[in-house]
Amino acid sequence: MDHNPIGIKKIKARDILDFTKAALSDPNYRDIVPVSMSRAIAHSKNPYAEKEDVVLLVAYMDGRCVGYHGILPGLLQRDGNFSPVFWGSTFFVSNPFRGRGVGKALLENIKSLNVDFVVTGMTGQAKKALKDFGLKRLGQLIFCQIRLDRIKIFSGFKKRLFYRLMLNQMSANVKDFRYIQVKQIKHSEDAATLGTNSPHFYRGIDLINWMLRYPWIQSSGEMKNRWGRYYFSEVRYIFRYIALEIYSGEMELYQGFLILSISRTRKKTVVKVLDYNFNNPADSKIACLLTVKYARDVLADRIEFPLCLEADFSCKFLRKFFLKRQKRTYLFLPKDKDSALANSAGELVLKFCDGDIPFS
């Protein structure tokens, strides 16, 4: 039986850059690198993180990195008040060390932080480990996909034709508008609270602009994976955010904004509708139209979007063959029975961009 002790190091937001710089040249991280420099920079700039917040736990055996668990500080809004919440992010244990208590040790250290902890978008294996440890079901989010990859012989020409048909149908229901691509959203409207006064995980303009400025994943033309072995996405053929400000046809009246992500791997290209907000909620049709335009431009295999936009995307041939609803489970471990997360558990409005989902 292996009796080697498991050591856990807690890395705080104030120390994440120094830790990452040291780890990238340390032979003890030759097989597993627990964080990339792009993620470390992002963690150090998170507007919702305090300097003392733990953002990464690293597990060691014999001084060698054998696993890690990322943590993303965020905010929960309830009745106009804000309280900290901590999202589980990348969770990994090296294959040769599984079954030796490494994952449990990482989770025990998260529990010792005494924070409101929540996870979504996890793998099946991570979900089992979290439930076995005692995390409870918080809720389930339903979202939508348009999946052209359900038909394997869908060529580039057929994709263009498909998106052209969608654009023609959708354009008939949208008034004239103009849009410009920007690096940061300058308007102060809040995408997180649109349409709800119920408790929710807060996502303000400051967080959206932080995401736009500090992406976790880089396009392969911008960055090469030179630093050992990552067990999370660090580089893709294409990964970029598209931030759009939308105006009336005469460019006189600001109408709202839209944030998309475009991701291309060896297998597929995915366009996601992330954040959006419009002065007139009915203008969400514009968001859908622009999403399809960008999907056409990159010949996307999939489009992913919140359930509330389903009607704006739908048409007869789409619903029958290509539109699919998906589910995403949330698990949580409250700080205590009276914490903000515990008291909000039955009322929370879950959002497509909760947690670290927009970064992937």
Image (tube, rainbow, N blue to C red):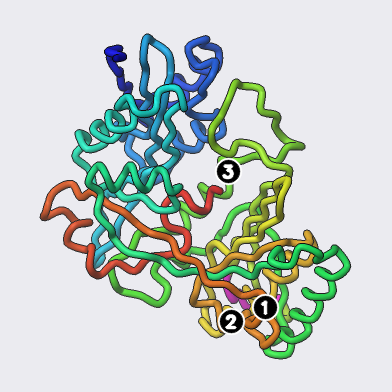
Dot 1 or dot 3, earlier in sequence: 3
Residue 192 position within the rendered picture, expressed as x and y whole percent measured from the top left? 42, 65
Residue 74 position within the rendered picture, expressed as x and y whole percent measured from the top left? 35, 49
Q: Secondary structure at mark 2?
A: helix
Q: Residues within 10 Å of mark 2 (few under 14, many from 20)?
A: some
Dot 1 or dot 2, earlier in sequence: 2
The N terminus lies in quadrant: top left
- Residue ID at (42%, 37%): 91
Splitting the image into 4 quarters, where does residue 43 fall?
A: top left
Can you identify the residue that label 3 sits on? 215
Please identify the residue farthest to the front as the structure is shown.
1
Q: Which residues are magenta?
A: 251-256
Q: CA distance from mark 1 to mark 3?
A: 34 Å
Q: Residues within 10 Å of mark 1 (few under 14, many from 20)?
A: few
Q: Secondary structure at mark 1?
A: helix
Please identify the residue farthest to the right as the structure is shown.
157
Task: Relative to 308, say whether 154 is above or below.
Answer: above
Can you identify the residue that label 1 sits on? 321
Say which amino acid is labelled 3: Pro
Q: Nearer the viewer, mark 1 or mark 2?
A: 1
- Specify whether residue 253 is painted magenta: yes
Residue 265 position within the rendered picture, expressed as x and y whole percent measured from the top left? 70, 46
Task: Relative to 318, say whether 154 is above or below.
Answer: above
Can you identify the residue that label 2 sits on? 283
Residue 327 position within the rendered picture, expressed as x and y whole percent measured from the top left? 45, 65
- Between 14 and 309, the residue placed more toward the observer is 309
